[in-house]
Image: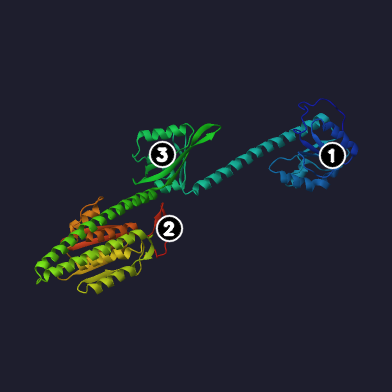
């Protein structure tokens, strides 16, 4: 079968064993197999095993082809899309009709890639095999590149999923700041779409709150390859300002800066809450100051009146008016002391507000005030249910406001109206047709420092304001000719760092 032509084969230089391709010889005759192995041993790793094994190329004689064709087809299919060549050795005395053309018509996939007729010329054999093996190596290299690209694509998909689910606004820019990528959180936070942002720079978010030195320090840090982080006040597309904790890191490739990635966590609500907490601390300290002054000022004055009338009684034993004054002032002292005690207890408790239905609470307060002041008409306009974020002390604040409206109402036909409305927030309005709260009582509530009080009831108003503030609510007093209007606003849900906590009330109202 083999021709002993040992002429030099162009390009057939010897290779190290770990670089050489493997050729499996599927040849039944031991003599022919040895001759073929001698032709190929200096260039390839020759496998003489007669059962199909892993190889780069299969050289099979025509008499064994039918026996091994199914196994060879399985190998070709397994290796796909990498090319795995099979070469048929066709003997000159063979009556076999196997050819590339006939196999191409019958087999899928095509198992044979070339046919070499005996007697075999060594140079021709090596050239034909090498051509096929070059195709295989090229296919392997291409598949390796495809696998690398697929791996990078998987990594990019994983990165994109991580970016999209991070919950933070993320921006990737070129080294000059031109935006290349933004995630959906960026769009939601800023109001700018990806189309708006890409090709622009982060200057579209500039609020004007930071000076040139601030940004110069930022750029100096990241261009040096370091990470910059800090709080930044940005501006949304609609003009609203917000605060982010921003971290900017360089993207490095072989030590060179290719761009920057910016991760931004919005902390607007947290900053507001911290400022509110600081404000509450200041108010609490102010309340303590005022409480001390009231106790010192009001009790001292009332005691002076008590002492004055007591001295006069000593000189005018027949007068009952002085005795009434003594009793009235003594009661006032007791009432002021009790208010101070209640406020101190409330401050010590400092209970955490919670979600609750406030409709039963408002109805209870209205019923109590009707019973205590039957001459005053107390009307309510309430929904069936209204869930709001409030503390247990909210009822005390509401009672204080409604009782005040009824107690000091000197109109001929006194009335108090309580209305509860549900919108973005819960609004509770208390209106009356009385003389209104004196301006002197309201002034201390609008100031951030201790002032002298003309009436002890300002302490009660301070207590009301403090309770509403603890509920993250607001209170507003309006005085007009026909009476007073007090508006309370409470949040429907508790918000922490921009996330709404699960509520227990019915939010459909």
Q: Which mark is residue 202?
A: 3
The residue that appears at 37% across and 43% down in the rendered structure is 234
| Mark 1 and mark 2 residues within 8 Å of each other at the beta carbon | no
Depth check, mark 2 against mark 3: the one in front is: 2
The percent position of residue 278, horizontal first and vertical second, equals 34, 50
The percent position of residue 65, horizontal first and vertical second, equals 82, 44
Residue 433 seen in the current view? no
Q: Quadrant of the N terminus?
A: top right
Tell whether 3 sits left or right of 136: right
User: Which of these two is toward me, 363 or 393?
Assistant: 393
Give the alpha-carbon distance from disc 3 to disc 1, as whole Å. 68 Å
Tell whether 191 sits left or right of 49: left
- In the rendered view, tell whether residue 136 sits above or below residue 422: above
Q: Residues within 10 Å of mark 3 (few under 14, many from 20)?
A: some
- In the rendered view, tell whether residue 378 sits above or below residue 171: below
Q: State the residue position of label 1.
A: 48
**Along the polypeptide, which appears first: circle 1 or circle 2?**
1
The quarter holding residue 412 reads bottom left
The residue that appears at 89% across and 40% down in the rendered structure is 29
Residue 143 seen in the current view? yes
| Mark 3 and mark 1 residues within 8 Å of each other at the beta carbon | no
Q: Quadrant of the C terminus?
A: bottom left
Depth check, mark 3 against mark 1: the one in front is: 3
Give the alpha-carbon distance from disc 2 to disc 3, as whole Å. 32 Å
The quarter holding residue 169 reads top left
User: Which of these two is toward me, 116 or 273?
Assistant: 273
| Secondary structure under the numbered disc 3 in the rendered image | helix
Q: State the residue position of label 2.
A: 501
């Amino acid at each position: 079968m083999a021709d002993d032509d040992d002429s030099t084969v162009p390009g057939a230089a010897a290779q190290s064993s770990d670089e050489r391709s493997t050729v499996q010889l599927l040849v039944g005759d031991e003599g022919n197999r040895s001759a073929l192995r001698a032709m190929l041993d200096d260039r390839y790793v020759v496998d003489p095993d007669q059962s199909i094994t892993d190889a780069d190329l299969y050289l099979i004689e025509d008499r064994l082809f039918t026996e091994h064709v199914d196994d060879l087809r399985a190998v070709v299919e397994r290796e796909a899309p990498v090319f795995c060549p099979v070469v048929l050795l066709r003997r000159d005395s063979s009556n076999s009709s196997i050819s590339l053309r006939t196999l191409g018509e019958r087999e899928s996939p095509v198992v044979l890639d070339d046919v070499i007729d005996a007697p075999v010329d060594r140079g021709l054999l090596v050239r034909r095999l090498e051509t096929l093996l070059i195709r295989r190596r090229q296919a392997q290299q291409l598949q390796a590149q495809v696998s690398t690209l697929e791996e990078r694509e998987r990594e990019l998909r994983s990165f994109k999923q991580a970016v999209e689910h991070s919950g933070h606004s993320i921006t990737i820019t070129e080294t000059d700041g031109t935006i290349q990528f933004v995630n959906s959180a960026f769009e939601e936070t800023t109001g700018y779409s990806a189309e708006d942002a890409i090709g622009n720079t982060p200057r579209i978010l500039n609020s004007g709150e930071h000076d040139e030195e601030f940004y110069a320090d930022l750029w100096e840090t990241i261009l040096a390859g370091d990470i910059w982080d800090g709080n930044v006040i940005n501006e949304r597309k609609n003009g609203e300002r917000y605060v982010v904790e921003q971290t900017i890191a360089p993207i490095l490739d072989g030590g060179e800066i290719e761009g920057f990635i910016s991760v931004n966590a919005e902390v607007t609500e947290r900053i507001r809450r911290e400022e509110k907490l600081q404000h509450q601390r200041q108010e609490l300290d102010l309340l303590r100051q005022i409480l001390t002054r009231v106790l010192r000022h009001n009790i001292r004055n009332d005691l002076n009146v008590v002492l004055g009338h007591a001295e006069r009684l000593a000189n005018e034993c027949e007068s009952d008016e002085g005795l009434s004054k003594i009793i009235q002032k003594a009661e006032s002292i007791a009432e002021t002391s009790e208010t101070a005690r209640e406020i101190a207890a409330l401050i010590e408790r400092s209970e955490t507000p919670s979600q609750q239905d406030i409709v039963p609470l408002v109805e209870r307060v209205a019923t109590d005030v009707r019973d205590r002041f039957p001459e005053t008409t107390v009307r309510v306009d309430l929904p069936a249910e209204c869930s709001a974020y409030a503390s247990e002390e909210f009822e005390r604040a509401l009672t204080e406001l409604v009782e005040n409206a009824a107690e000091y109402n000197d109109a001929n036909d006194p009335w108090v109206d309580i209305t509860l409305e549900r919108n973005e927030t819960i609004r509770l309005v208390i209106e009356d047709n009385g003389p209104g709260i004196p301006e002197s009582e309201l002034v201390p509530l609008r100031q951030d420092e201790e002032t002298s009080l003309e009436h002890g009831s300002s302490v009660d108003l301070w207590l009301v304001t403090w309770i509403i503030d603890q509920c993250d609510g607001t209170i507003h007093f309006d005085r007009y000719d026909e009476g007073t209007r007090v508006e309370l606003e409470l949040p429907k849900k508790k918000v922490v760092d921009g996330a709404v906590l699960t509520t227990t009330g019915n939010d459909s109202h």
